[in-house]
Image: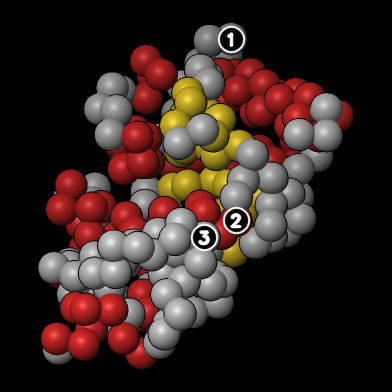
Amino acid sequence: MPDQIDLFNLSEVKDTAPPADFNPDLIPTDVKVPIPSGTYPTLDPIPDHCNRCHRCDLGATRTHAVVGRGNPKADIMIVGEGPGQNEDETGIPFIGKAGQLLEKILESVKLSSQDDVYISNVVKCRPPNNRTPTTDEMEACKPYLMEQIRLVDPKIILLTGATAVKGITGDKRGITKIRGEWLEWDNRLCMPIFHPAYLLRNQSREKGGPKWLMWQDIQAVRAKLDEIRGSGA
Ligand code: URA
């Protein structure tokens, strides 16, 4: 394995260019070997690598790694927690009930999940019994997500639930504390929002309830997107 380690220890790897001798077969799936920014020239090789990845124990129990869907050049990226059963079976993120609700939320402000957003997760493999991914699992998987963010280059990132917030920004506050407020992370605008699965468990639409708050948040996202697009940024 020394070749593999040398290849991925190139300290001079540029932020946006892959190493000159980029060889997808040598992408490390062992957590001890880093995956630096610039490793992937496009999103295309990532699913194959995630399907071969054993950077954490979730690789042992997955059916499919679940990497992303939507427009790879979208202005909005949505980051969830991790695949559930439907996602593990199909390899497609947010395809189950929570995903269907997410589609409705997007549609309510005329956002298309095919054109306007790219959807991914903090961890690409399903945690057994849908438990919350551990900090180690999130860290092991993080380089894939960082590469996705770099390559999609979204103007806005929606972080669905506290795990997505923690996985990306390290902020451990509860989602009810931080939802609806713009955060700046990595020079990008991020909005923590409730996870759609939480809304499925809390159906009340009354003012101040989770669904009402989500409606406020998604409207704020739509307004910010219009503002950014209008300003040509
Ligand atoms: N919940 C998530 O966080 N991600 C999915 O892909 C599906 C459900």
Q: Position of residue 86 (x, y in %)?
A: 44, 67
Residue of label 2: 152
Q: Which mark is residue 16?
A: 3
Q: Amino acid at mark 2?
A: Val
Numbered disc 3: secondary structure: loop
Task: Name which residue lies at 83% across and 27% down.
Answer: 231
Task: Name which residue lies at 65% across and 61% down.
Answer: 72
Q: Is residue 146 above or below residue 39?
A: above
Numbered disc 1: secondary structure: loop
Q: Which mark is residue 222?
A: none
Q: Mark 2 against mark 3, which lies toward the viewer?
A: 3
Q: Is residue 126 above or below residue 215?
A: below
Label 3 close to label 1 by CB (< 8 Å):
no
Q: Position of residue 173 (x, y in %)?
A: 28, 22
Name the quarter where the C terminus is drawn: top right
**CA–CA distance between discs 2 and 3?**
12 Å
Is 57 left or right of 114, judged from the image as shown?
left
Q: Looking at mark 3, is its residue's CB closer than 8 Å to ligand 1?
A: no
Name the quarter where the N terminus is drawn: bottom left
Numbered disc 2: secondary structure: helix
Q: Which mark is residue 207?
A: 1
Q: Looking at mark 2, is its residue's CB closer than 8 Å to ligand 1?
A: no
**CA–CA distance between discs 1 and 2?**
35 Å
Nearer to me, 45 or 177: 45
**CA–CA distance between discs 3 and 1?**
45 Å
Is 28 left or right of 145, judged from the image as shown?
left
Task: Name which residue lies at 15% across and 53% down.
Answer: 136
Q: Residue furthest top?
A: 207
